Image (cartoon, rainbow, N blue to C red):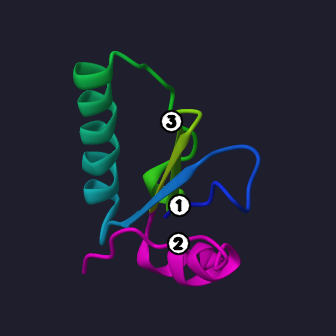
Amino acid sequence: MNIKEVANFTDYFVIASGSSDRMLDSLNNAVLRGIKSKHHKTVISEGIARGGWIVLDYGDVVVHLFSPDQRDFYRLEDLWSDGQIILHLQ
């Protein structure tokens, strides 16, 4: 989601859901490894899978990994609806 025009703290949100704690942990680890190997950036993730929300802040890109319940509760796509959805996969 491109939020450059509506936020001053980042340019993009990546929002994904995992159907279990194990899947959220796997998504988290995959993002951490992928960004480190391809872009040589390291970040510490905030939140835990058991809590249903993990955030990885890379400055111009913030990755949100949600459980389905937490994603429905926080509804970031609605909260930042002035932003532009670049890609939507289900």
Q: Is the residue under label 1 in contact with that under label 2 (CB below 8 Å)?
A: yes
- Mark 1 falls on what kind of element? loop
Find out whether residue 67 is within the magenta segment. Answer: yes
Find out whether residue 45 is within the magenta segment. Answer: no
> Label 3 sits on what residue type?
Ser
Q: Relative to 72, is 37 above or below?
A: above
Left or right: residue 67 versus residue 37 is right
Q: Relative to 83, is 27 above or below?
A: above
Q: Foreground mark, 3 or 1?
A: 1
> Label 1 sits on what residue type?
Asn
Check disc 3 and report the residue beneath it. Answer: 45
Q: Which mark is residue 76?
A: none
Specify the segment rendered in magenta.
Answer: 66-90
Disc 3 crowd rating (10 Å Cα; few below 14, some 14-19, many 20+) is some
Q: Residue furthest top?
A: 40
- Mark 2 falls on what kind of element? loop
> Label 2 sits on what residue type?
Gln
Q: What residue appears at the point 26 percent right and 28 percent down from the top-left corner?
A: 33
* Nearer the observer, 54 or 49: 54
Check disc 2 and report the residue beneath it. Answer: 84
Q: What residue appears at the point 34 percent right and 56 percent down from the top-left corner?
A: 24
CA gap, disc 2 to disc 3?
25 Å
* Nearer the observer, 40 or 83: 83
Check disc 1 and report the residue beneath it. Answer: 2
Q: Which mark is first along the chain, 1 or 2?
A: 1
CA gap, disc 3 to disc 1?
21 Å
Q: What residue appears at the point 63 percent right and 83 percent down from the top-left corner?
A: 78
Q: Quadrant of the C terminus?
A: bottom left
Disc 2 crowd rating (10 Å Cα; few below 14, some 14-19, many 20+) is some
Could you say where residue 8 lies in the image, as x and y percent from the top left?
76, 47
